[in-house]
């Protein structure tokens, strides 16, 4: 709060640090504007966290949070002892790692490429076309992907043309991560590049002019002006991405996987989903949610610390 | 007419006798609210919204059958009908909020009725037996349904939607292209070896006549579908019962034999290579495009109707279930024995007049109630001729709606799951001759292997979930890999050991206990 106040105070900052009360009085309109946001976070983000206590209970919907039996870490230990725990953890992390390595940079490259395009009409068309898939539901995306990679699908037809054997993309576990990640890039590259494109437009054009006068090639300009200019944005996006390493959308996986590819495709959320079909296990699902969040939180703090140490900017 | 008169007499008799029978003698120890046995003016009912209603119909009150029942009983229903996609969520919210309607229609049996009874959400109906004379007398006539109605603790909590005739449960089964069989001069297969020969001929002898070997002899939806073939080896990919003992398919030697048969079919290209990931639309597409020869699916009324115009030669028929080694037709299709489906109506603890409400619900099991719920109003939706109900053109040749939809919009027993008795005499009229023929063919089958829907306690349920999650993951992975030849049959030995280590023994024990309880439950009713 104080920080916001002092930044806003701008020119008068040179005076003695004001007391909190005085600040509050002086900028009360701004504080009032803040109230809805704070309320939103309390109501919809912090209050529901209290509901996580059901992870430590045998929650019964008829008894509610206050009367359900407390069972401590039972659900956590059930999950950790599951024979498939390590496979699920590995698959969840691997899918995220793949997307971190391939999907994350793709949006940056996309933005850099578009930045170099001079023909505005072409640039706008490419942008629109690439972020269109973002608005298509996963069900349809997955249906199209399956059609492409099925045994008589587009890709195998091309492969057959070259006289090669049909590749069982859908039923061989070693292809799953690739299919998932590449379709993910197709789905999100345009959308994710928007934030970088806007960051690029904020870079001072004077820098490019000066570089051009000094005889810097476009490559050099990209490396020495554009990328450093993007770095804070990239760092923040990367930290946030690492903060969701344990989260995978289960819809798309469920639509793409089948028992033959469980080996690489079955992740925590899909396993819990299948389990949920058999019995509504609120507490167990909550326990796994808490488990995921804790790991995410640790990764987030670590990534932030690392980013601050290496390039001086971080989320907090 | 004679039958109607009889019905009216019966109804009258019931009406006269009722006030003098037990129902009038209210239990004085009860709270004063339950002293009334009058049918209420209004009842709130939480139910299932069928998609056949269409968007412009708000609830079932405009459905012919319910309109007529309202006239007869004087009770108006306040429906609470969440759309089917949001049903579970709305149900849970309702339970958690404790704002309960009088009656809740839900899958009580699979939800675990005892839990809700213990937490005082719903009330037992045993003490009010005298308020459900029609239901009781119906059960006297059909004692085979009793076991499926009694809860784990021996009480009755709900009034079920009953599919009275066996044919009503047999809406799904194997289908084959009769015209392909005729063209290749083949007999309808009856055993595993004959089926293999037929499928082989479909593959090699070009029954669709396009000069290419593009036929898919057996198309299916996932391993679950392909595994229906296991039935002829006297096993299935699930729990089942044999001589009173619970078995789990994967652990049995018959299963291995069946899997070797299925994987042989796959290896020779007789099973759809895309079986693991295709959907129903694709599968049906292969059938209607003259590519597939056999599949397991819903009775072929729809496909036959669409194909009748396109290709008059097309003939998809219900195929008899394959015989096992001892020459008996067997099936693993559980629906076949579920006359009492899980969906049923319970009265909640918030109901102010449970006896009156029960009496009202009971009227849907009277002969008249059953007739109204199955056929609607005489001369409007049905006519009587020689004691047989016949739907009118309002249902059968409705200018606006297909038969199924017209029936859903007029007849209560279609799709509403409201507690009553559904009749084959009514349902069958909405099917094509192909559909009826298929159902008749499939009905001739031995179902002794199938387990009924059983009551598990909460603890049992939780233990089963924890045991079976890894087991089913493991087993389904093995099955697909074995069918596709990615894993050899020799791995069965070690796979069975793994499943044993995962605790299948304990899971079978829980099933056995529940099954034993089910068998014993009968006497306490």
Image (spheres, rainbow, N blue to C red):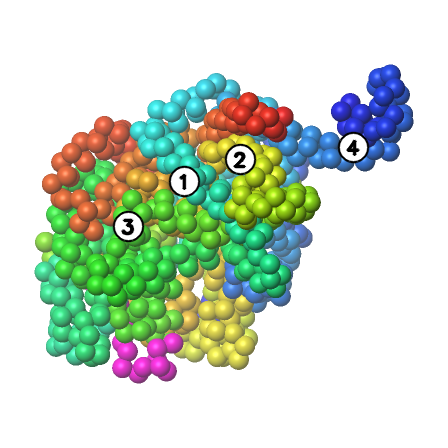
Disc 3 marks which residue? A171
Does mark 4 fall on the same chain as mark 3?
yes
Q: Secondary structure at mark 2?
A: helix
Say if mark 3 contacts mark 4, CB within 8 Å: no
Q: Residue at 36%, 40% (x, y): give it.
A: A266
Q: Are marks 2 and 4 on the same chain?
A: yes
In this picture, residue B495 sits left or right of residue B278: left
Q: Tag 4 or tag 2, which sits nearer the N-term?
A: 4
Q: Chain of mark 1?
A: A
User: Which mark is drawn over residue A98?
Assistant: 1
**Between marks 2 and 4 in the image, the one whose residue lies nearer the viewer:** 2
Q: In the rendered image, which residue does mark 2 sit on? A: A238
Residue placed most toward the observer, B333 or B362: B333
Element marked by disc 1 = helix
Query: Which residue is at 35% across, 51% downward?
Result: B338
Instruction: Give the magenta range.
Output: B306-321
Q: Alpha carbon of mark 2 to alpha carbon of mark 4: how far?
A: 30 Å
- Counting residues from the start of the chain, the first of labels 3 and 1 encountered is 1
Q: Secondary structure at mark 4?
A: helix
| Dot in front, 1 or 4 | 1
């Amino acid at each position: 709060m104080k920080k916001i106040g002092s930044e806003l105070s701008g020119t008068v900052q040179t005076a003695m640090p004001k007391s909190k009360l005085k600040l509050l009085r002086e900028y009360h309109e701004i504080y009032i504007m803040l109230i809805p946001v704070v309320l939103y976070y309390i109501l919809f983000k912090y209050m529901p966290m209290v509901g996580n206590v059901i992870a430590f209970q045998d929650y019964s919907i008829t008894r509610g949070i206050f009367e359900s039996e407390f069972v401590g870490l039972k659900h956590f230990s059930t999950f950790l002892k599951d024979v498939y725990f390590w496979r699920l953890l590995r698959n969840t992390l691997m899918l995220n790692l793949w997307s971190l390595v391939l999907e994350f940079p793709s949006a940056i490259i996309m933005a850099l490429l578009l930045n170099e395009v001079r023909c505005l009409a072409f640039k706008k068309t490419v942008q629109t076309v690439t972020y269109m898939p973002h608005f298509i539901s996963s069900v349809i995306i997955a249906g199209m992907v399956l059609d492409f990679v099925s045994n008589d699908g587009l890709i195998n037809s091309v492969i057959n043309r070259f006289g090669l054997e049909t590749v069982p993309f859908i039923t061989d576990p070693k292809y799953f991560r690739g299919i998932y990640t590449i379709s993910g890039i197709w789905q999100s590259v345009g959308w994710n590049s928007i934030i970088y494109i806007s960051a690029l437009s904020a870079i001072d054009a004077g820098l490019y002019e000066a570089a051009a006068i000094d005889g810097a090639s476009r490559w050099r300009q990209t490396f020495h002006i554009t990328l450093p200019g993007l770095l804070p944005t990239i760092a923040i996006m990367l930290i946030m991405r690492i903060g969701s390493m344990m989260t995978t959308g289960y819809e798309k996986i469920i639509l793409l996987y089948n028992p033959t590819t469980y080996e690489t495709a079955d992740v925590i959320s899909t396993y819990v989903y299948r389990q949920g079909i058999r019995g509504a296990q609120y507490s167990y699902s909550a326990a796994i949610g808490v488990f995921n969040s804790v790991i995410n939180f640790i990764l987030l703090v670590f990534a932030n610390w690392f980013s601050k140490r290496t390039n001086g900017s971080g989320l907090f | 007419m004679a039958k109607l008169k009889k019905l009216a007499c019966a109804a009258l008799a019931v009406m006269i006798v009722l006030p003098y029978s037990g129902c009038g003698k209210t239990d004085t120890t009860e709270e004063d609210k339950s002293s009334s046995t009058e049918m209420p003016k209004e009842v709130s009912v939480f139910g299932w919204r069928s998609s056949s209603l269409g968007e412009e119909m708000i609830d079932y009150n405009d459905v012919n059958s319910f309109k007529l029942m309202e006239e007869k009983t004087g009770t108006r229903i306040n429906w609470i009908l969440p759309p089917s996609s949001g049903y579970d969520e709305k149900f849970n919210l309702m339970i958690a909020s404790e704002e309960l309607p009088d009656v809740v229609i839900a899958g009580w049996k699979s939800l675990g009725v005892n839990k809700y009874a213990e937490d005082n959400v719903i009330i037992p109906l045993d003490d009010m037996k005298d308020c459900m004379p029609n239901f009781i007398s119906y059960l006297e006539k059909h004692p085979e349904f009793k076991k499926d109605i009694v809860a784990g603790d021996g009480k009755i909590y709900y009034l079920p939607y009953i599919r009275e005739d066996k044919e009503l449960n047999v809406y799904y089964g194997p289908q084959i292209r009769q015209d392909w069989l005729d063209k290749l001069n083949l007999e309808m297969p009856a055993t595993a070896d004959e089926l293999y020969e037929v499928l082989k001929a479909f593959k090699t002898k070009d029954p669709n006549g396009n000069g290419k070997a593009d036929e898919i002899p057996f198309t299916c939806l996932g391993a679950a579908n392909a595994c229906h073939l296991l039935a002829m080896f006297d096993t299935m990919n699930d729990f089942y019962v044999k001589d009173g003992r619970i078995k789990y398919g994967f652990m049995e030697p018959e299963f291995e034999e069946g899997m070797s048969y299925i994987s042989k079919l796959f290896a020779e290209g007789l099973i759809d290579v895309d079986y693991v990931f295709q959907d129903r639309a694709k599968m049906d597409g292969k059938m209607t495009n003259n590519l597939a020869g056999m599949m397991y699916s819903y009775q072929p009324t729809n496909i036959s109707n669409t194909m009748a115009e396109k290709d008059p030669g097309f003939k998809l028929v219900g195929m008899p279930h394959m015989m096992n080694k001892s020459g008996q037709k067997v099936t693993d299709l559980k629906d076949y024995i579920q006359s009492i489906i899980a969906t049923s109506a319970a009265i909640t603890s918030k109901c102010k007049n449970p006896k009156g409400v029960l009496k009202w619900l009971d009227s849907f099991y009277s002969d008249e109630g059953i007739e109204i719920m199955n056929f609607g109003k005489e001369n409007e939706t049905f006519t009587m001729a020689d004691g047989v109900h016949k739907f009118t053109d309002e249902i059968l040749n409705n200018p606006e709606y297909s038969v199924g939809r017209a029936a859903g919009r007029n007849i209560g027993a279609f799709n509403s799951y409201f507690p009553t008795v559904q009749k084959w005499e009514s349902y069958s009229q909405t099917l094509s001759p192909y559909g009826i023929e298929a159902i008749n063919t499939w009905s001739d089958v031995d179902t002794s292997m199938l387990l009924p829907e059983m009551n598990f306690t909460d603890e049992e349920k939780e233990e089963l979930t924890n045991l079976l999650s890894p087991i089913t993951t493991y087993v389904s992975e093995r099955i697909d890999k074995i069918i596709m030849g990615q894993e050899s049959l020799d791995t069965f030995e070690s796979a069975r050991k793994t499943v044993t280590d995962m605790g299948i023994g304990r899971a079978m024990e829980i099933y056995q206990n529940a099954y034993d309880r089910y068998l014993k439950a009968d006497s306490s009713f």
